[in-house]
Amino acid sequence: MGSAAEFVPSSAMAIVAHPDDIEFGCAGTCAKWAKRGARIVYVLVTSGNSGSQDPSLTREALAELREREQRAAAAICGVREIEFLRYNDGEVMPTLELRKDLVRLIRKHKPEVVIALDPTRMYDGDDYINHPDHRAVAIATMDAVAPIAAMPLLYPELGPAHQVREVWIQWVDDPNTWVDISETLELKIQALLQHRSQVGEEVAERVRQWAYQAGRGLVPAEAFKVIFLKKREPERSAHPE
């Protein structure tokens, strides 16, 4: 079983569909890495402009509100760079346009690690169908990372080619890497609670339970499937059991 407790990339980019996807997923890891000096960039493909049952809200007003919530959540985790692509919530498709937008951002920020959604996840258990935006963003992210962003003859107008070293996939059934978030679990929860348009205080205990489940009851953790596109330098490798 791989453990990434000691691994800290120099830079990482989390690419997700909606405000709060990071906080529900990888915010503990992002906060831990940020505390250790990593440069973290959040990429939000939508601003969640359909994510409300309140008919008095417009999509424009909701997008503005949810971007404010996301900025507040990111700041709690020590993250100050956020890219909003502002696709319409609920209408994202894995198009060439989206792939190119993600290639442009990968080449701009040059992350060592990309944290991604799972392109294979259609449902979870017997009571949840994965949001189509999650699936679309996941596919576009994988296509942008490997191999497109690293190919200098493809889209030179989007910037110099950049090869991401590792892809960390959150919300997976077959993780191979666990990050101990004991020191950042409460930051993760406080960040999630900034999304007041989406969650209430009751979510805190659920997130704690999920973290300990991921850590097999031993420590609070976040679990990932890591794809190593380039081998780590030996001194930076995780310690396998």
Image (spheres, rainbow, N blue to C red):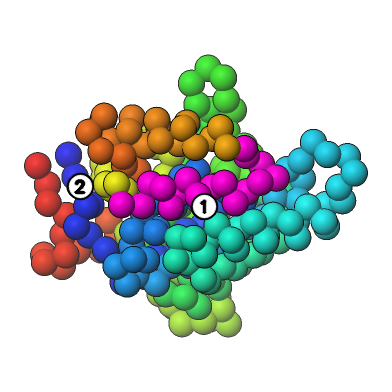
Residue span colored magenta: 183-200
**Mark 1 to mark 2 CA distance (whole Å):** 24 Å
- Mark 2 neighbour class, 10 Å CA radius: few under 14, some 14 to 19, many 20 or more: some
Q: Nearer the viewer, mark 1 or mark 2?
A: 1
| 173 vs 221: above or below | above
Q: Is residue 204 magenta?
A: no
Q: Secondary structure at mark 1?
A: helix
Q: Can see residue 91?
A: no
| 210 vs 7: above or below | above
Please tell me in which quadrant of the rendered image residue 100 appears.
bottom right
Q: Mark 1 sits on what residue?
A: 191
Residue 130, position in %: x, y?
Answer: 57, 33
Residue 95, position in %: x, y?
Answer: 64, 55
User: Which amino acid, mark 2?
Assistant: Ser
User: Which amino acid, mark 1?
Assistant: Ala
- Left/right placement of residue 102 relative to residue 181 reads right
Q: Mark 2 sits on what residue?
A: 3
- Left/right placement of residue 132 relative to residue 221 reads right
Front in this rendered view, residue 86 or 184: 184
Q: Are marks 1 and 2 in contact (CB under 8 Å)?
A: no
